[in-house]
């Protein structure tokens, strides 16, 4: 008889302390030992995790009102500007925002850049943050300037809201050029001097649910050390890409927009990052539980690193100028081994994400569920899947270097 389970059945087992919860890494061994059917009968939840740079991240902050009140036209936190075109004392600080005294331009090699991701990290670490704001003054908001020191606990609300996290797969970045280049994938040495990658592979959330059967809008997740939720599909969510027979996409594919209470989170799992020659970003820890509803979910959650392929992309020409160059694919087992073969050359690999931290996230989430602290949520709506009518748009070629018709 085919194994079928419901969210409520699994949650009831969680409440009674009877749920069998394993990490995606452990699920591989269980399937190898017992097979798909037995694994489906025995396992209730598989936990996943990823920890890597996720540039499309940031936080909504509400500072509360001063006396007299101010309508903040421009806001800076430790010298990093936050977007304040929302309301009087609301702002959004983006992880990649740079201070005005470091024009995003020449982030010189060897220079540390303090950006939005560092501000968020320092907020979560309960450090004092310098708040500066200016305004034009109105009858209802007469104040024109304020400078003060704040901490996260002084804010009324602070929500982490990340428009694009947890890429389902990603590039393996290389440099075919003859000079070192500085990118968001790290330093790429010339003439295939190294290969950079950024994914947890077999532990990565969307690679364990390739068609988004259980991960959807409303899914409760581990986010930044606290509890968060999938708010929407992420920007550049592009699920209808070529896929392998096991459903794993052969490119970026799905992404998630996620939200959570910043005050619950930890500086261990939200870490500001400075990339030489590129700028600022933030490392985000994210984990998602996957309910084993049937045998199909067992097959997805037992995916191995050697079964996950990612495209090799040249960042000296192919990436910045959108010129596809066929360099083939490599798998995550080889990437994690420290070397891959590209065009017949053995190339050392450099991870941008942390597999040990991804493993730790999956273990923490596993313990939360086993202890009854964390129950599963059934999505209120699905994410667009592989058959979705979604087209990935770029700027028209004729407008790339000039006015693009948008105001």
Image (cartoon, grey):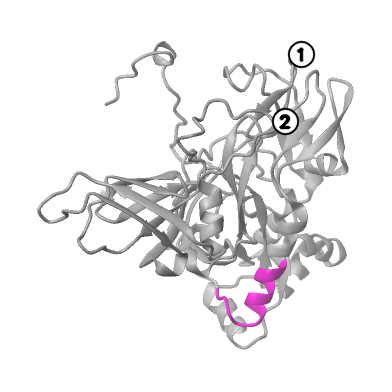
Q: Answer with left or right where residue 325 lies relative to residue 137.
A: right
In this figure, which residue is indicated by the disc labeled 2? 187
Disc 2, disc 1: CB below 8 Å?
no
Left or right position of 116 against 325: left
Work out whether residue 378 can be spotted: no
Disc 2 residue crowd, few under 14, some 14–19, many 20+, Cα 10 Å: many
Q: Disc 2 on helix, strand or loop?
A: strand
- Tell me where the magenta segment starts and ends, as one range: 363-375
Residue 314, above or below 339:
above
Residue 147 x %, y %: 35, 54
Label drawn at residue 178 = 1
Q: Quadrant of the C terminus?
A: top left
Residue in the image at 50% along x and 46% along y: 116
Residue at screen point 23% across, 55% down: 70
As drawn, the label of residue 350 is none
Is residue 367 a member of the stretch shown in magenta?
yes
Residue at image location 73% in from the left, 51% down from the top = 354
**SS of the residue at dot 1?**
loop
Mark 1 Cα-neighbour bin, 10 Å: few <14, some 14–19, many ≥20: few
Which picture quadrant has residue 267?
A: bottom right
Residue 198: percent from left, percent from top: 69, 42
* 95 or 23: nearer the viewer: 95
């Amino acid at each position: 008889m085919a194994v079928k389970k419901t969210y409520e059945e699994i949650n009831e087992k969680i409440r009674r302390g009877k749920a069998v919860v394993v990490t995606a890494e452990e699920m591989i061994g269980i399937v190898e030992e017992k097979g798909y059917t037995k694994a489906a009968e025995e396992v209730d939840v598989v936990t996943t995790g990823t920890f890597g740079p996720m540039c499309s991240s940031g936080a909504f902050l509400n500072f509360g009102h001063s006396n007299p009140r101010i309508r903040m036209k421009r806001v800076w936190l430790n010298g990093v500007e936050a977007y304040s075109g929302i309301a009087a004392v609301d702002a959004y600080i983006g992880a990649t925002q740079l201070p005005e005294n470091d024009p995003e331009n020449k982030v010189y090699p060897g220079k540390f850049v303090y950006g939005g991701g560092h501000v968020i990290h320092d907020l979560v670490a309960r450090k004092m943050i310098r708040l500066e704001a200016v305004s034009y003054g109105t009858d209802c908001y007469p104040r024109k300037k304020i400078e003060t020191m704040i901490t996260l606990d002084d804010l009324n609300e602070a929500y982490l809201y990340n428009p694009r996290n947890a890429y389902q797969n990603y590039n393996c970045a290389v440099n075919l050029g003859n000079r070192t280049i500085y990118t968001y994938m790290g330093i790429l040495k010339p003439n295939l001097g190294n290969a950079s990658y950024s994914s947890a592979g077999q532990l990565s959330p969307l690679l364990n649910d390739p068609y988004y059967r259980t991960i959807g809008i409303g899914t409760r997740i581990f986010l930044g050390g606290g509890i968060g939720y999938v708010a929407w599909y992420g920007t550049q969510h592009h699920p209808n890409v070529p896929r392998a027979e096991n459903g794993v996409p052969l490119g970026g594919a799905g992404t998630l927009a996620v939200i959570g209470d910043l005050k619950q989170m930890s500086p261990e799992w939200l870490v500001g990052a400075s990339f030489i020659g590129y700028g600022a970003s933030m490392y985000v820890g994210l984990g998602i539980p996957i309910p084993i509803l049937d045998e199909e979910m067992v097959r997805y959650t037992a995916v191995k690193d050697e079964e996950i392929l990612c495209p090799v992309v040249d960042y000296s020409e192919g990436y910045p100028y959108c010129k596809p160059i066929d360099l083939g694919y490599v798998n995550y087992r080889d990437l994690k081994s420290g070397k891959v073969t590209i065009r017949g050359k053995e190339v050392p690999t450099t991870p941008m994400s942390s597999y040990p931290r991804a493993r730790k996230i999956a273990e923490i989430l596993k313990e939360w569920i086993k202890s009854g602290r964390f129950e599963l949520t059934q999505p209120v709506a699905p994410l667009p899947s592989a058959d979705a009518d979604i087209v990935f748009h770029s700027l028209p070629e004729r407008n790339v270097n000039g006015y693009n018709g948008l105001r």
